[in-house]
Amino acid sequence: MSTIALSAYILMWPVIVAVVLFVISRAFYREWAEARRGGRRLI
């Protein structure tokens, strides 16, 4: 495996994790804001 391919393979995982964390965080914030507007508890 070339050095560039190995570097790209290793560096893509933090990007994937960051994207997944962003999607989960955005969904949580939407649910929280909707519950707050409706006067309900989130949990």
Image: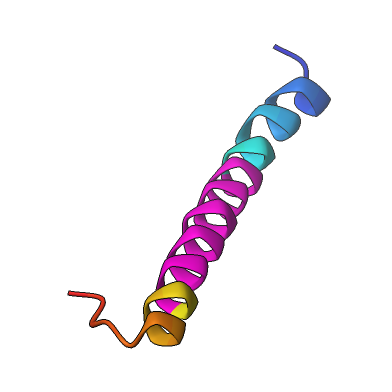
The answer to whether residue 22 is magenta is yes
Question: The N terminus is located in which quarter?
Answer: top right
21 to 39, vertically: above or below: above
Residue sitting farthest toward the right: 4
**In the image, is 10 to the left or to the right of 20?**
right
The answer to whether residue 30 is magenta is yes
Task: Name the image quarter holding residue 41.
Answer: bottom left
Q: Whole-percent x and y of residue 42?
A: 26, 76
Q: Whole-percent x and y of residue 10?
A: 62, 36
The answer to which of 32 and 24 lies nearer the viewer is 32
Q: How many marks?
A: 0
Give me the residue at 66% from left, 28% from top: 9
**In the image, is 26 to the left or to the right of 15?**
left
21 to 4, vertically: above or below: below
Dominant secondary-structure state across the stretch colored magenta: helix
3 to 17, vertically: above or below: above
Task: Name the image quarter holding residue 4.
Answer: top right
The answer to which of 29 and 14 lies nearer the viewer is 29
Residue sitting farthest toward the top: 1
33 to 27, vertically: above or below: below
Give me the residue at 53% from left, 47% from top: 20
Which span of residues is magenta-colored? 14-32
Give me the residue at 42% from left, 67% from top: 31
**In the image, is 19 to the left or to the right of 36?**
right
The answer to which of 34 and 23 lies nearer the viewer is 34
Q: Whole-percent x and y of residue 18?
A: 59, 54
Give me the residue at 49% from left, 72% from top: 29
